[in-house]
Protein backbone atom coordinates (compact mmCIF):
# COMPACT_ATOMS: atom_id res chain seq x y z
CA UNK A 1 0.00 0.00 0.00
CA UNK A 2 2.76 2.49 0.93
CA UNK A 3 4.50 1.75 -2.37
CA UNK A 4 1.50 3.07 -4.31
CA UNK A 5 1.43 6.24 -2.17
CA UNK A 6 5.16 6.83 -2.67
CA UNK A 7 4.74 6.34 -6.40
CA UNK A 8 2.31 9.26 -6.43
CA UNK A 9 4.99 11.53 -4.98
CA UNK A 10 7.65 10.47 -7.48
CA UNK A 11 9.37 7.71 -5.50
CA UNK A 12 9.99 4.02 -6.15
CA UNK A 13 9.02 0.86 -4.29
CA UNK A 14 12.50 0.63 -2.80
CA UNK A 15 12.10 4.11 -1.27
CA UNK A 16 9.05 2.82 0.58
CA UNK A 17 10.99 -0.23 1.72
CA UNK A 18 13.85 1.91 3.06
CA UNK A 19 11.38 4.17 4.87
CA UNK A 20 9.58 1.18 6.40
CA UNK A 21 12.85 -0.37 7.54
CA UNK A 22 13.83 2.85 9.31
CA UNK A 23 10.36 3.17 10.75
CA UNK A 24 10.72 -0.32 12.27
CA UNK A 25 14.32 0.18 13.40
CA UNK A 26 14.17 3.63 15.05
CA UNK A 27 17.59 4.77 13.75
CA UNK A 28 20.40 3.14 11.72
CA UNK A 29 23.74 3.99 10.12
CA UNK A 30 23.58 3.87 6.32
CA UNK A 31 26.02 0.94 6.19
CA UNK A 32 23.95 -1.23 8.50
CA UNK A 33 20.76 -0.28 6.67
CA UNK A 34 22.34 -1.26 3.35
CA UNK A 35 23.40 -4.63 4.76
CA UNK A 36 19.95 -5.34 6.21
CA UNK A 37 18.32 -4.59 2.88
CA UNK A 38 20.99 -6.26 0.71
CA UNK A 39 21.75 -2.98 -1.08
CA UNK A 40 25.12 -1.42 -1.83
CA UNK A 41 26.16 1.72 0.07
CA UNK A 42 26.00 4.01 -2.96
CA UNK A 43 22.40 2.99 -3.69
CA UNK A 44 21.26 3.33 -0.08
CA UNK A 45 22.70 6.86 0.10
CA UNK A 46 20.84 7.80 -3.09
CA UNK A 47 17.55 6.52 -1.68
CA UNK A 48 18.14 8.21 1.68
CA UNK A 49 18.91 11.53 0.03
CA UNK A 50 15.75 11.27 -2.08
CA UNK A 51 13.72 10.67 1.08
CA UNK A 52 15.54 13.42 2.98
CA UNK A 53 14.80 15.91 0.20
CA UNK A 54 11.09 15.35 0.86
CA UNK A 55 11.53 15.43 4.62
CA UNK A 56 10.68 11.75 5.06
CA UNK A 57 13.96 10.84 6.77
CA UNK A 58 16.37 12.84 8.89
CA UNK A 59 20.09 12.49 9.53
CA UNK A 60 21.72 12.98 12.92
CA UNK A 61 24.91 11.92 14.65
CA UNK A 62 25.41 9.62 17.63
CA UNK A 63 28.87 9.06 19.13
CA UNK A 64 30.52 10.28 15.95
CA UNK A 65 28.44 8.00 13.71
CA UNK A 66 25.92 9.43 11.23
CA UNK A 67 22.55 7.75 11.58
CA UNK A 68 19.28 7.94 9.73
CA UNK A 69 15.80 8.02 11.19
CA UNK A 70 12.33 7.95 9.63
CA UNK A 71 10.25 11.10 10.03
CA UNK A 72 6.69 10.89 11.33
CA UNK A 73 4.25 9.30 8.87
CA UNK A 74 2.31 12.57 9.18
CA UNK A 75 4.94 14.03 6.86
CA UNK A 76 3.59 11.87 4.03
CA UNK A 77 0.16 13.47 4.40
CA UNK A 78 1.73 16.93 4.42
CA UNK A 79 3.58 16.16 1.17
CA UNK A 80 0.37 14.96 -0.47
CA UNK A 81 -1.50 18.05 0.77
CA UNK A 82 1.21 20.30 -0.61
CA UNK A 83 1.18 18.53 -3.98
CA UNK A 84 -2.62 18.73 -4.12
CA UNK A 85 -2.44 22.49 -3.47
CA UNK A 86 0.18 22.90 -6.19
CA UNK A 87 -1.88 20.89 -8.67
CA UNK A 88 -4.98 22.94 -7.86
CA UNK A 89 -3.01 26.14 -8.36
CA UNK A 90 -1.67 24.98 -11.72
CA UNK A 91 -5.14 23.82 -12.76
CA UNK A 92 -6.61 27.25 -11.98
CA UNK A 93 -3.91 28.90 -14.09
CA UNK A 94 -4.65 26.50 -16.95
CA UNK A 95 -8.38 27.24 -16.80
CA UNK A 96 -7.64 30.94 -17.28
CA UNK A 97 -5.67 30.38 -20.49
CA UNK A 98 -7.64 27.36 -21.79
CA UNK A 99 -9.99 29.39 -24.04
CA UNK A 100 -7.02 31.04 -25.72
CA UNK A 101 -5.23 27.70 -26.18
CA UNK A 102 -8.35 26.17 -27.75
CA UNK A 103 -8.77 29.11 -30.11
CA UNK A 104 -5.19 28.64 -31.33
CA UNK A 105 -5.66 24.96 -32.20
CA UNK A 106 -5.75 24.38 -35.94
CA UNK A 107 -8.18 21.64 -36.96
CA UNK A 108 -8.14 20.50 -40.55
CA UNK A 109 -11.22 18.35 -41.13
CA UNK A 110 -10.10 17.54 -44.67
CA UNK A 111 -7.42 15.29 -43.19
CA UNK A 112 -8.92 12.70 -40.83
CA UNK A 113 -6.77 11.98 -37.80
CA UNK A 114 -6.13 8.47 -36.56
CA UNK A 115 -4.78 7.56 -33.11
CA UNK A 116 -4.06 3.96 -32.13
CA UNK A 117 -3.99 2.50 -28.59
CA UNK A 118 -3.07 -0.90 -27.14
CA UNK A 119 -3.66 -2.66 -23.81
CA UNK A 120 -5.90 -1.70 -20.90
CA UNK A 121 -4.11 1.56 -20.13
CA UNK A 122 -4.19 2.59 -23.77
CA UNK A 123 -7.90 1.86 -24.13
CA UNK A 124 -8.61 3.81 -20.94
CA UNK A 125 -7.07 6.82 -22.67
CA UNK A 126 -9.85 6.59 -25.25
CA UNK A 127 -12.48 6.91 -22.53
CA UNK A 128 -10.56 9.83 -21.03
CA UNK A 129 -10.60 11.55 -24.42
CA UNK A 130 -14.42 11.39 -24.42
CA UNK A 131 -14.39 12.94 -20.95
CA UNK A 132 -12.64 16.05 -22.30
CA UNK A 133 -15.95 17.17 -23.82
CA UNK A 134 -18.88 18.94 -22.16
CA UNK A 135 -22.60 19.36 -22.82
CA UNK A 136 -22.88 16.97 -25.76
CA UNK A 137 -24.92 13.93 -26.76
CA UNK A 138 -22.94 10.84 -27.71
CA UNK A 139 -23.83 7.52 -29.35
CA UNK A 140 -22.37 4.18 -28.28
CA UNK A 141 -22.68 0.73 -29.84
CA UNK A 142 -21.49 -1.27 -26.85
CA UNK A 143 -21.03 -4.95 -25.96
CA UNK A 144 -21.19 -4.05 -22.27
CA UNK A 145 -19.65 -7.21 -20.80
CA UNK A 146 -16.67 -6.92 -23.13
CA UNK A 147 -16.16 -3.26 -22.25
CA UNK A 148 -16.14 -4.08 -18.54
CA UNK A 149 -13.59 -6.84 -19.14
CA UNK A 150 -11.28 -4.67 -21.19
CA UNK A 151 -11.11 -1.55 -18.96
CA UNK A 152 -12.41 -2.75 -15.58
CA UNK A 153 -15.55 -2.13 -13.56
CA UNK A 154 -13.98 0.36 -11.14
CA UNK A 155 -12.75 2.56 -13.97
CA UNK A 156 -16.17 2.65 -15.63
CA UNK A 157 -18.06 3.11 -12.39
CA UNK A 158 -15.83 5.45 -10.40
CA UNK A 159 -14.25 7.52 -13.17
CA UNK A 160 -16.20 7.39 -16.44
CA UNK A 161 -19.73 7.54 -14.98
CA UNK A 162 -19.00 10.31 -12.48
CA UNK A 163 -16.97 12.35 -14.94
CA UNK A 164 -19.57 11.94 -17.69
CA UNK A 165 -22.34 13.17 -15.40
CA UNK A 166 -20.20 16.03 -14.12
CA UNK A 167 -19.49 17.16 -17.68
CA UNK A 168 -23.13 16.78 -18.76
CA UNK A 169 -22.37 14.18 -21.44
CA UNK A 170 -25.50 12.34 -22.55
CA UNK A 171 -25.30 8.93 -24.16
CA UNK A 172 -27.56 6.74 -26.23
CA UNK A 173 -26.22 3.21 -26.38
CA UNK A 174 -27.18 -0.06 -27.97
CA UNK A 175 -26.06 -3.38 -26.49
CA UNK A 176 -26.47 -6.93 -27.82
CA UNK A 177 -28.71 -9.01 -25.57
CA UNK A 178 -25.99 -11.59 -24.86
CA UNK A 179 -23.49 -8.87 -23.79
CA UNK A 180 -25.76 -6.84 -21.50
CA UNK A 181 -25.41 -7.02 -17.70
CA UNK A 182 -27.82 -7.20 -14.77
CA UNK A 183 -28.53 -3.53 -14.04
CA UNK A 184 -29.22 -4.23 -10.37
CA UNK A 185 -25.58 -5.35 -10.09
CA UNK A 186 -24.23 -2.73 -12.52
CA UNK A 187 -26.56 0.26 -11.96
CA UNK A 188 -24.15 2.70 -13.61
CA UNK A 189 -25.16 1.14 -16.95
CA UNK A 190 -28.83 1.85 -16.31
CA UNK A 191 -31.21 3.64 -18.65
CA UNK A 192 -32.55 6.62 -16.76
CA UNK A 193 -32.81 10.37 -17.25
CA UNK A 194 -30.84 10.96 -14.03
CA UNK A 195 -27.99 8.90 -15.45
CA UNK A 196 -28.25 10.93 -18.69
CA UNK A 197 -28.43 7.68 -20.61
CA UNK A 198 -30.90 5.95 -22.89
CA UNK A 199 -30.40 2.25 -23.62
CA UNK A 200 -31.76 -0.16 -26.17
CA UNK A 201 -31.12 -3.87 -26.71
CA UNK A 202 -30.21 -4.94 -30.24
CA UNK A 203 -32.26 -7.61 -32.04
CA UNK A 204 -31.43 -11.21 -31.05
CA UNK A 205 -29.48 -11.97 -34.22
CA UNK A 206 -27.10 -9.05 -33.72
CA UNK A 207 -23.89 -9.99 -31.91
CA UNK A 208 -20.56 -8.18 -31.69
CA UNK A 209 -17.48 -7.91 -29.47
CA UNK A 210 -16.04 -4.62 -30.74
CA UNK A 211 -17.80 -1.42 -29.78
CA UNK A 212 -17.69 2.19 -30.90
CA UNK A 213 -18.49 5.55 -29.32
CA UNK A 214 -19.40 8.62 -31.41
CA UNK A 215 -18.64 11.96 -29.76
CA UNK A 216 -17.90 15.43 -31.07
CA UNK A 217 -16.20 15.01 -34.43
CA UNK A 218 -14.70 11.64 -33.48
CA UNK A 219 -15.49 7.94 -33.49
CA UNK A 220 -13.64 5.67 -31.05
CA UNK A 221 -13.48 1.95 -31.78
CA UNK A 222 -12.69 -0.46 -28.92
CA UNK A 223 -12.01 -4.19 -29.16
CA UNK A 224 -12.66 -6.89 -26.58
CA UNK A 225 -10.05 -7.92 -24.01
CA UNK A 226 -9.00 -10.77 -26.32
CA UNK A 227 -7.43 -8.36 -28.81
CA UNK A 228 -7.11 -5.33 -26.48
CA UNK A 229 -6.71 -2.45 -28.87
CA UNK A 230 -8.63 0.63 -29.90
CA UNK A 231 -8.37 3.66 -32.12
CA UNK A 232 -9.91 7.10 -32.54
CA UNK A 233 -10.77 8.51 -35.96
CA UNK A 234 -11.33 12.28 -36.12
CA UNK A 235 -13.42 12.75 -39.23
CA UNK A 236 -16.75 14.43 -40.01
CA UNK A 237 -17.47 11.90 -42.73
CA UNK A 238 -16.81 8.96 -40.39
CA UNK A 239 -19.07 10.50 -37.75
CA UNK A 240 -21.84 10.93 -40.32
CA UNK A 241 -21.50 7.36 -41.59
CA UNK A 242 -21.49 5.76 -38.15
CA UNK A 243 -24.30 7.99 -36.90
CA UNK A 244 -26.54 6.97 -39.80
CA UNK A 245 -25.82 3.29 -39.13
CA UNK A 246 -26.42 3.77 -35.41
CA UNK A 247 -29.82 5.41 -35.92
CA UNK A 248 -30.99 2.57 -38.18
CA UNK A 249 -30.07 0.03 -35.48
CA UNK A 250 -31.54 2.24 -32.74
CA UNK A 251 -34.94 2.15 -34.43
CA UNK A 252 -34.78 -1.66 -34.63
CA UNK A 253 -33.75 -2.13 -31.00
CA UNK A 254 -35.83 -2.64 -27.86
CA UNK A 255 -36.08 0.17 -25.32
CA UNK A 256 -35.33 -0.55 -21.65
CA UNK A 257 -35.71 1.58 -18.51
CA UNK A 258 -34.13 1.51 -15.07
CA UNK A 259 -36.21 2.43 -12.03
CA UNK A 260 -35.46 5.63 -10.13
CA UNK A 261 -34.97 3.64 -6.91
CA UNK A 262 -32.03 1.68 -8.39
CA UNK A 263 -30.40 4.86 -9.68
CA UNK A 264 -30.97 6.81 -6.46
CA UNK A 265 -29.42 4.00 -4.43
CA UNK A 266 -26.37 4.05 -6.72
CA UNK A 267 -26.08 7.85 -6.40
CA UNK A 268 -26.33 7.65 -2.60
CA UNK A 269 -23.67 4.94 -2.33
CA UNK A 270 -21.27 6.86 -4.58
CA UNK A 271 -21.94 10.41 -3.35
CA UNK A 272 -23.11 11.60 -6.76
Image (tube, helix red, strand yellow):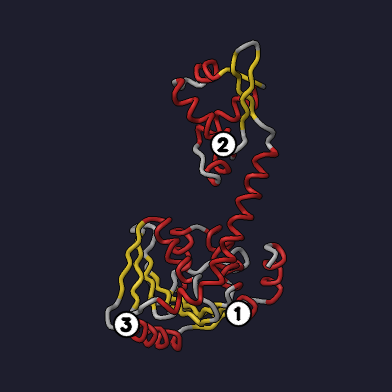
Q: Nearer the viewer, residue 143 or 158?
A: 158
- Residue 109 marker: 3
Q: Sequence-wise, which precedes: disc 3 or disc 1?
A: 3
Are the residues tagged 3 and 1 within 8 Å (C-beta)? no
> What residue sits 56% from the left and 57% below the top?
154
Are there few (<14), some (14-19), or many (20+) residues within 10 Å of tag 3? few
User: Element at badge 3?
Assistant: loop
Are the residues tagged 1 and 2 within 8 Å (C-beta)? no
Please provide percent x and percent y for residue 207.
38, 72
> What residue sits 64% from the left and 25% below the top?
69
User: Element at badge 1?
Assistant: loop
Closest to the camera, between mark 3 and mark 2, is: 2
Mark 3 → mark 1, Cα distance in angstroms: 37 Å
Please provide percent x and percent y for residue 8.
54, 46
Q: Please name the residue that numbered disc 1 is placed on.
A: 257
Q: Please name the residue that numbered disc 2 is placed on.
A: 53
> What residue sits 50% from the left and 57% below the top?
152
Residue 237 in the image: above or below residue 132 = below
Mark 1 → mark 2, Cα distance in angstroms: 56 Å
Please provide percent x and percent y for residue 250.
45, 85
Please provide percent x and percent y for residue 137.
51, 82
Left or right: 135, with 26 as reference point: left
Closest to the camera, between mark 3 and mark 1, is: 3
Image quadrant holding the C terminus, namely bottom right
Residue 47 in the image: above or below residue 212 = above
Quarter residue 210 falls in: bottom left
Q: Sequence-wise, which precedes: disc 3 or disc 2?
A: 2
Are there few (<14), some (14-19), or many (20+) residues within 10 Å of tag 1? some
Q: Sequence-wise, which precedes: disc 1 or disc 2?
A: 2
Total marks shown come to 3
Mark 3 → mark 2, Cα distance in angstroms: 49 Å
Amino acid sequence: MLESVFKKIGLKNVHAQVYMQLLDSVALPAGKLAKMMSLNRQSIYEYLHDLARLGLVKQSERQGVKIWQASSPDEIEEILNEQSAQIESVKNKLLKILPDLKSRRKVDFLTPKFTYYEGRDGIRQIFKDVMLYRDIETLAFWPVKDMIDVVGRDFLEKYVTKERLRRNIYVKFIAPANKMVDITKYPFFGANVKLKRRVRIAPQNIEYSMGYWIYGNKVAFISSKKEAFGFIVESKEMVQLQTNQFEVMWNLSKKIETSDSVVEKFFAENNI
